[in-house]
Amino acid sequence: MQPVSFKGFAGVALKGDAFGAPDDPAVLLIHGGAQTRQVWDEVADALVKAGRHVIRIDLRGHGESEWPADGRYDFNAFVEDLRAVLAQMASRPVIVAASLGGWAATAALGEEGAHLAAGLVLIDSVPDMDFTAVCRPDDETGAQPCFDPVFARSFDPEAAVARVTGAAAHIRMPVLFVRGAESELSGADAAKGFLGNFENVEYAEIREAGQMVAAERADMFSATLLDFLERKVPRFAPEYRQGSDARTLRDALGCFATGVTVVTTLDEEGQPVGLTANSFTSVSLDPPLLLVCIAKTASSLDALEAAENFAVNVLHIGQQPTSNLFAKAGEDRFAATPWSRGHNGAPLLSGALANFECRRHALHEGGDHVILVGEVVRARFEPRRDPLLYFRGKYRRLHFA
Ligand SMILES: Cc1cc2nc3c(=O)[nH]c(=O)nc-3n(C[C@H](O)[C@H](O)[C@H](O)COP(=O)(O)O)c2cc1C
């Protein structure tokens, strides 16, 4: 995380932070009224893991950003701040903005800043939203919890609605509007009415979420956001490759993400044998069958074809070295790997994410591989561990659950 600072309207210092690789496409996160940039913690994490460069700032008078010396704390100042920040950014970001931040973003982009951003994501940001529903005064103190009195004095709701609605009609970039299904800020009808102003807009509702969707259901919000970004503002321009050659086939097959297993058995002398395999698939529940494809060139094949029993060990994220060891020739694979005999004798790797003890069910011809089908006689798994993944020839880990 890197601290960042922008000069807002009339020189106000707007503070924030940046995450991820600066070469990745940028996403600018703008919080709503009475929030700070911390509201984005989980979303920022998910975006960085999905290959985005994230910048998040505090609006003026919020978090670490300055209160303006000239006392300007009106809606126009927020709009000008945002335009100033966009002009200082190295590339055109997608703006993700909540409530007040979203109105400011819509005004900033629709009026004259269209070239400053690549997309806009609005969260519960209907301009004529019902403040009274969420800003009930505190019973004891009478204080308005989420509508700053300085801002309230200078805020003209009707003018802001007209301004934001008018600006929306000029926005041509892809827009996503996200609403908490239980949000009290704006009804679904009001939201859909507002969306009619945009030319290129999608609407999403997040279940089990109120007005703080990005914090309350960060998992569902992040998934919706990443889906929109990958479709509408992809990290790379789509560039399909095609062909009938072996390279294209391998690369295309590598687009199917898998886990990683080690398939084990005992050879005729009772010695453990095993190899790394990601060609594992469940086949049938009744009877319980699975399969794995073993290369005809694999030295383990003879033992696997001959053995009555074998085991499939699914590796967890910490077992990348085990995967490498069982894929490399000439190593004493079991000397360096803790294991024990399963009920049917086949070696079970200790600490694996899951172990399947199998009886050989069938062997099928499969081109340069043999398809080994096993009937599962016993399964064991550890539910809290993350899997080791394999995708496009590289080990990977889960982005988020
Ligand atoms: C991630 C990964 C997945 C693999 N999947 C398979 C597979 O499904 N089937 C296979 O025969 N070999 C697979 N291999 C290659 C074997 O693990 C490798 O050729 C190993 O050295 C074979 O050992 P062996 O010749 O001692 O049997 C994979 C290797 C890696 C790194």
Image: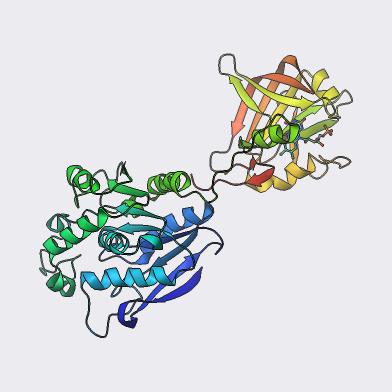
Residue placed furthest toward the bottom: 69
Residue 307, percent from left and from top: 80, 20
Vertical order, 178 against 8 (above or below): above
Q: Quick check: can you spot residue 230?
A: yes
Q: Nearer the viewer, residue 141 or 182?
A: 182
Q: Quadrant of ligand 1?
A: top right
Q: Quick check: can you spot residue 217?
A: no
Quarter of the view holding residue 41: bottom left
Coloring scheme used: rainbow
Is residue 140 shown left or right of residue 366? Answer: left
Residue at left 20%, top 55%? Answer: 165
Is residue 382 shown left or right of residue 262? Answer: left
Vertical order, 117 against 361 (above or below): below
Residue 204, percent from left and from top: 32, 42
Is residue 368 shown left or right of residue 116? Answer: right
Q: Nearer the viewer, residue 189 or 374?
A: 189
Vertical order, 140 against 162 (above or below): below
Q: Nearer the viewer, residue 128 or 16?
A: 128
Residue 113, percent from left and from top: 34, 64
